[in-house]
Image (cartoon, rainbow, N blue to C red):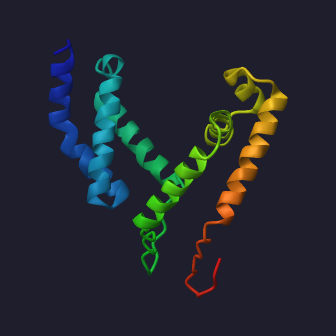
Amino acid sequence: MKRGDADFVAFAQANSVRLQRAAYLLTGDRHQAEEAAQATLVRVYAAWGRVQRKDPYAYARTVLTNLVTDQWRRPMREYATETMPEPPAAHDVADVVSKRRWLISALQALSPRERAVVVLRHFFDASEAEVARELDLSAGTVKSLNSRALAKLRITAGSVPPVRLETEAGVGL
């Protein structure tokens, strides 16, 4: 233990109950009071070197009051509702696998340079200049390869039946 840690442990053991009671009076909730008292002790320990020579309990009371007051000032981020939100819809694993297989086969139908340009441009979101530099091509070549590859992918996508999503109201998207 560091020098002064034993003093802090003795202070915490002697005053933690008093801090919890004070926190309970400030918050009105036992759990919040315990959290506030713990947070107070953490902050007092962080400042223990300069606090122990003065009145450590007065410092702890001030820290506790400031912590509770700060909680009052913070906007509430959770709002209670009467009904629970709907759980996210489960993904159709078979549909995801079939789309992934289609995408891989469609990309394999492209030439290696076209595939590299499409992946770098659209998957890695690289600019045309970055793709040109990485593949050692001119910017015009990157543009034309990208255009041809996307046209081939559109033709291939036209042969796949579209997926129809139904909303809760039964309206197709």
Q: Which residue is drawn at 39% across and 37% down?
A: 63
Residue 13 lies in quadrant: top left
Residue 88 lies in quadrant: bottom left
Q: From the viewer's side, name the closer residue of 164 and 138.
A: 138
Q: Is residue 84 above or below residue 34?
A: below
**Which residue is at the far top?**
3
**Which residue is at the far right?**
140
* Residue 55 in sight in this render: no
Q: Residue at x 58, y 72 (%)?
A: 163
User: Is 50 left, or right, of 163 in this rendering?
Assistant: left
Q: Which residue is drawn at 59% across and 87% down?
A: 169
* Residue 6 in sight in this render: yes
Q: In this view, does 113 lie above or below 70?
A: above
Measured as percent of width and height from the top left, residue 70 is found at 48, 47
Q: From the viewer's side, name the closer residue of 67 and 59.
A: 67
Q: From the viewer's side, name the closer residue of 103 and 155.
A: 155
Measured as percent of width and height from the top left, residue 86 is found at 45, 75
Measured as percent of width and height from the top left, residue 95 is found at 47, 66
Q: From the viewer's side, name the closer residue of 58 and 162.
A: 162
Q: In this view, does 151 lie above or below 134?
A: below
Q: Which residue is drawn at 75% across and 23% down?
A: 137
Q: In this view, does 153 lie above or below 167?
A: above
User: Is 85 left, or right, of 157 in this rendering?
Assistant: left
User: Is 65 left, or right, of 19 in this rendering?
Assistant: right
Q: Quadrant of the C terminus?
A: bottom right
Q: In which quarter of the image is the N terminus?
A: top left
How many discs appear? 0
**Which residue is at the far bottom?**
170
Measured as percent of width and height from the top left, residue 45 is found at 29, 26
Residue 120 lies in quadrant: top right
